[in-house]
């Protein structure tokens, strides 16, 4: 029993050390002050905080604590698979396979029942199969848009060149957190009526 406990703890600690690497995975989105790119660990933390803060705007059947668990796990696969830019068609062609392989390795570091639990949380998020996953996915789409809109080091601009591009990308917000959809439509309207579109960085 002592040996089993020691092995379990060793696997948990190994996982903790490994997921520290998520802090090195850089995203396309920059911090609002423009000083550097956001990393995926910061992104996950920001989303978890948003899930709690914006709970009153979530659909009434959403278990917020479960949504937070989904958000804390959802990007761990990027340690191996990297962050795939939302407008990278070639990257999206291989994204699912890369992330499945990453999930097997990374969650496989954990004790078996925790490996299954974490893998199930990640798969639930990816499948958008529950109200919690839909809310979590909504926040995952909204957060980068909020960072872009509240940039302080330059004039803000959406990267997309058509409303349809943005609406398609942001559709999970309308379905998973309809109470937050007016934020999205407001930013889109502002961007396309003021010419704040098409910026690459």
Image: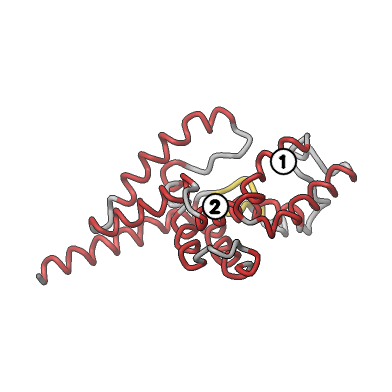
Dot 2 or dot 1: first in sequence order is 2
Q: Which residue is mark 1?
A: 166
Please indicate whether residue 8 sits to the left or right of residue 116 in the image.
left
Residue 58: quadrant of the picture: bottom right
Element at badge 1? Answer: helix
The residue sitting at 29% across, 54% down in the picture is: 115
**Cα–Cα gap, marks 2 and 1:** 18 Å
135 and 142: which is toward the camera: 135
Residue at coordinates 71% horizontally, 56% vertically from top-left?
146
Q: In the image, 136: left or right of 96? A: right
Q: Quadrant of the N terminus?
A: bottom left
The C terminus: image quadrant: top right
Q: Nearer the viewer, residue 178 or 122?
A: 178
- Where does the image place residue 8, in percent across and percent down from the top left? 21, 64
- Tell me how many marks there are: 2
Question: Mark 2 touching mark 1, by CB under 8 A?
Answer: no
Categorize mark 1 by other alpha carbons within 10 Å: few (<14), some (14-19), many (20+). some
Question: Which residue was labeled with disc 2?
Answer: 134
Is residue 18 found left or right of 48 in the rendered image? left
**171 up-or-down from 57: above or below:** above
* Residue 26 in the image, given as x and y percentages of width and height: 55, 49
Q: Secondary structure beneath disc 2? A: helix
**Residue 189 percent location from the top left of the image:** 84, 47
Seen in the picture, residue 188 relative to 94 is either above or below; the reply is below
Please indicate whether residue 114 sits to the left or right of residue 47 in the image.
left
- Work out whether 77 lies above or below 20: above
Please name the residue shown 32% across and 44% down the image: 104
């Amino acid at each position: 029993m002592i040996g089993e406990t020691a092995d379990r703890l060793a696997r948990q600690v190994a996982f903790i050390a490994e997921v520290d690497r998520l802090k090195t995975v850089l995203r396309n989105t920059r911090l609002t002050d423009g000083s550097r790119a956001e990393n995926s660990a910061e992104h996950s933390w920001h989303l978890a905080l948003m899930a709690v803060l914006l709970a009153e705007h979530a659909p009434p059947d959403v278990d917020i604590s479960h949504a937070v668990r989904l958000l804390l796990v959802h990007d761990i696969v990027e340690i191996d698979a990297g962050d795939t830019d939302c407008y990278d068609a070639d990257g999206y062609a291989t994204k699912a396979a890369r992330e499945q392989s990453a999930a097997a390795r990374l969650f496989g570091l954990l004790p078996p029942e925790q490996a299954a639990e974490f893998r199930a949380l990640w798969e639930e998020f990816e499948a958008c199969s529950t109200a919690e996953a839909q809310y979590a996915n909504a926040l995952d789409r909204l957060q980068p848009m909020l960072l872009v809109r509240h940039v302080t080091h330059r004039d803000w601009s959406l990267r997309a060149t058509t409303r349809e591009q943005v609406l398609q990308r942001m559709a999970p917000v309308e379905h998973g957190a309809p109470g937050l959809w007016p934020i999205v439509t407001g930013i889109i309207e502002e961007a396309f009526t003021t010419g704040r579109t098409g910026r690459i960085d």
